[in-house]
Amino acid sequence: MARQLSAGDPAPDVEFPTDQAGDISLATLRGKVLVLYFYPKDDTAGCTNEALAFSASKKRFDAAGIKVIGVSKDSIASHQKFRLKHKLTILLASDPETKIAEAYGVWVEKSLYGRRYMGMERATFLIDANGVIRQVWHKVRVAGHVEAVFEAGRSLSGAS
């Protein structure tokens, strides 16, 4: 099991396919503040609410110079359906082999009705322009989360 990353750690430089921008590596995003958020599954209640909240705030994030990318195990085709169905505006990355999730320590053992299984933890990483993790939210509750991430990111980006 991968270790959990904390503020001050370098962000693992991973490459991933996205539903709109082809393959992206974190190295190509250096110079920008980045919000990398992990969610369990496209088109489920909590994940949809989180994606809708980030999408509703996308213009604010863009204006502050903050890039937002959502990551799940779902395929690019699933992301495209999810985007169209809910009119999402944020970039979605596919991690079918959980390499990104493992690098960030969010592919974890879960338990439901006594059954143990591996799954994606809902977590968000705020990464500065130099590729250093500045803040981490684990076991995210969706209500109020996007606003907290925006405020933390805005302080890093120098936007007012």
Image: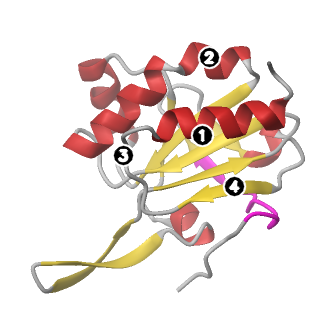
Q: Is residue 24 visible?
A: yes
Q: For marks 2 and 4, give the CA distance.
A: 19 Å
x then y, percent, for residue 41: 29, 50
Q: Is residue 92 visible?
A: no
Disc number placed over residue 133 in the picture, else none: none
The residue tagged 1 is: 149
The residue tagged 4 is: 135
Q: Badge 4: few (under 14), some or many (20 or more) residues near its Cα, within 10 Å? A: some
Which amino acid does the dot numbered 4 rest on? Gln
Q: Badge 3: few (under 14), some or many (20 or more) residues near its Cα, within 10 Å? A: some
Q: For marks 2 and 3, give the CA distance.
A: 28 Å
Which amino acid does the dot numbered 3 rest on? Ser
Residue in the picture at 75% in, 63% down: 7
x then y, percent, for residue 37: 53, 47
Q: Badge 1: few (under 14), some or many (20 or more) residues near its Cα, within 10 Å? A: some
Q: For marks 1 and 3, give the CA distance.
A: 26 Å
Q: Which residues are magenta?
A: 7-16
